[in-house]
Image (spheres, rainbow, N blue to C red):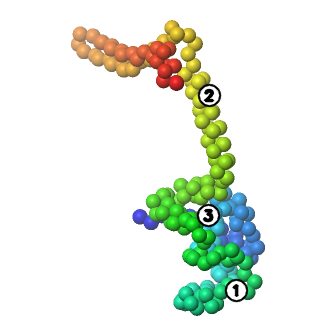
């Protein structure tokens, strides 16, 4: 089943139109509480600039030789430093990576991955250290053993039966000793 189109997608274009294209993707993202990369993707896929100008351009098909002759438009700085190839610097696997992800992951998960891709790897490592450290401290609080004789008794199973002879109650307990809790924590 195809994924349902986000209602924010059309609203984002409406906001873009209201500002005659003079609004940044970040501002639209803030208004709609949507990731900026999502807005950027919609803008490209739905060709907002072309729609706004009333021009839908078709791709020019040409041979590699003609492309080389034509080159970049005068004054274009988009391809500075690019030695050719297929649109990105040598070794760029971004399209391959996100194309693969988009095939198997839900849209919200893909947006999270795209947001992570913008983060500095050192920040990600530091955040993971903080999360692990907090988990250790919280576990210490939960699993704290006051002394070696401490024991926790919890009801594991409770069974009640009624018959003509009367009622019978059967309760099964689970015991957790101090050494067991400490070993589990470690």
Q: Element under label 2?
A: helix
Residue 175, x across and y down, in percent? 42, 15
Tell me how far mark 1 sits from mark 3, CA to CA: 28 Å
The residue where tag 1 is placed is: 73
Instruction: State which tag comes first along the sequence, 2 or 3.
Output: 3
Relative to the observer, which residue lies in front, 9 or 131?
131
Q: Is residue 164 left or right of residue 145?
A: left
**Residue sitting at x 65%, y 38%:** 130
Relative to the observer, which residue lies in front, 74 or 18?
74
Q: Nearer the viewer, mark 1 or mark 3?
A: 1
Q: Nearer the viewer, mark 2 or mark 1?
A: 1
**Residue sitting at x 29%, y 17%:** 161
For residue 144, above or below residue 66: above
Residue 69, x across and y down, in percent? 63, 91
The residue where tag 3 is placed is: 38
At label 3, counting other C-alpha atoms closer than 10 Å, the crowd grade (few under 14, some 14-19, many 20 or more) is some
At label 2, counting other C-alpha atoms closer than 10 Å, the crowd grade (few under 14, some 14-19, many 20 or more) is few
Q: Which mark is residue 137?
A: 2
Relative to the observer, which residue lies in front, 56 or 159?
56
For residue 130, above or below residue 8: above
Residue 18, x across and y down, in percent? 73, 73
Instruction: State which tag comes first along the sequence, 1 or 3.
Output: 3
């Amino acid at each position: 089943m195809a994924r349902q189109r986000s209602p924010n997608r059309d609203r984002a274009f409406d906001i873009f139109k209201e500002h005659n294209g003079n609004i940044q993707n970040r501002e639209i993202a803030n208004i709609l509480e949507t990731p900026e990369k999502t807005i950027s993707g919609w803008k490209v896929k739905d060709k907002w600039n072309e729609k706004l100008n009333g021009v839908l351009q078709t791709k020019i098909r040409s041979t590699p030789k003609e492309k080389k002759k034509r080159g970049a438009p005068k004054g274009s700085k988009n391809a500075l430093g690019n030695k050719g190839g297929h649109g990105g610097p040598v070794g760029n696997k971004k399209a391959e990576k996100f194309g693969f992800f988009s095939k198997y992951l839900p849209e919200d998960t893909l947006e999270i991955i795209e947001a992570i891709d913008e983060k500095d790897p050192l920040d990600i490592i530091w955040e993971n250290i903080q999360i692990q450290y907090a988990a250790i401290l919280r576990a210490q609080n939960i699993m704290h053993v006051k002394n070696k004789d401490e024991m926790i008794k919890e009801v594991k199973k409770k069974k009640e039966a009624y018959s003509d002879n009367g009622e019978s109650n059967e309760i099964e307990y689970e015991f957790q000793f101090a050494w067991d809790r400490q070993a589990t924590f470690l």
